[in-house]
Image (cartoon, rainbow, N blue to C red):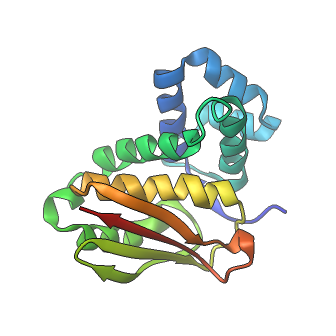
Amino acid sequence: METQVKVKGSGIGYTKEYIVKKYGKETMDRIVLLLPADAAATVQNAIPSAWYPIEHMGHLTDAIKRVVGAKERYAVFEISRQSAKATFSRLYRIFFKLGNPSFIMDRVASVWKNMASEGDLIVVERGDKFVVVRLSNFTYRHPDYCGHRLRGWFHAVLELSGCEITKSKHTKCTSNNDPHCEWRFEWK
């Protein structure tokens, strides 16, 4: 079922850039061939500041899993982690100079609306060495998008803030009929 949710093209572009860099243009071409025509056009021509249907990112996630994931179990997570590092280190560099991981995650929650057209992202629990992040009011349902792509995205933010992540887990998912998605991250 298609939603009205849109995402910024920057995530699509950085994902494509990372795949080409790590796996080669031929792998990216194979991934694009698996996409529906409209999603393929988005992936090939994404403008960083433009908004695109989230389903195109979902199709891209599925194609990555089919092409690269056959060899690397956590490919979607790692690709998302690396593309998020590129996004945040280029666009939000100042955040990482300002504070601790909890502070950074609060700021990322406020930046969410610049990356996705829907959803409320908040830190619901925090401690010296952990944080729990919740995404509610988000109608897109895709277990790999939430479980790997977004988990990789949050993971990268915490790493950029200086954390050495010891555990990251997608603990609740709307794809499993939970009322919202949640992730728990722990670090040294």
Front-most of residues 111 and 154: 154
170 over 66 or under it: above or below: below
The foreground one among 11 and 62 is 62
Picture coordinates of residue 44 (x, y %)?
A: 64, 30
The residue lying at 26 percent from left, 71 percent from top is 129
> Could you say which quadrant of the image residue 184 lies in?
bottom left
Residue 71 located left or right of residue 19: right
* Left or right: residue 166 compared with residue 39: left
Q: Position of residue 153 (x, y in %)?
A: 45, 54
Image quadrant in which the C terminus is located = bottom left
**Residue beneath the point at 84% across and 63% down:** 1
Outermost residue toward the right?
Answer: 1
Question: Residue 160, position in %: x, y?
Answer: 27, 52
- Which residue is drawn at the image coordinates 64% and 71% (left, top)? 173
Number of numbered labels in the structure image: 0
Residue 156 is situated, as x and y percent measured from the top left of the image, at 37, 52
Query: Would you identify the image quadrant in which residue 136 lies?
Result: bottom right
Task: Residue at 78%, 31% (x, y): give it.
Answer: 34
Q: In this rendering, would 115 be left or right of 143?
A: left
User: Relative to the observer, which residue lies in front, 126 or 21?
Assistant: 126
- Say if 63 sits above or below 143 in the image: above
Q: Is residue 131 above or below residue 26?
A: below
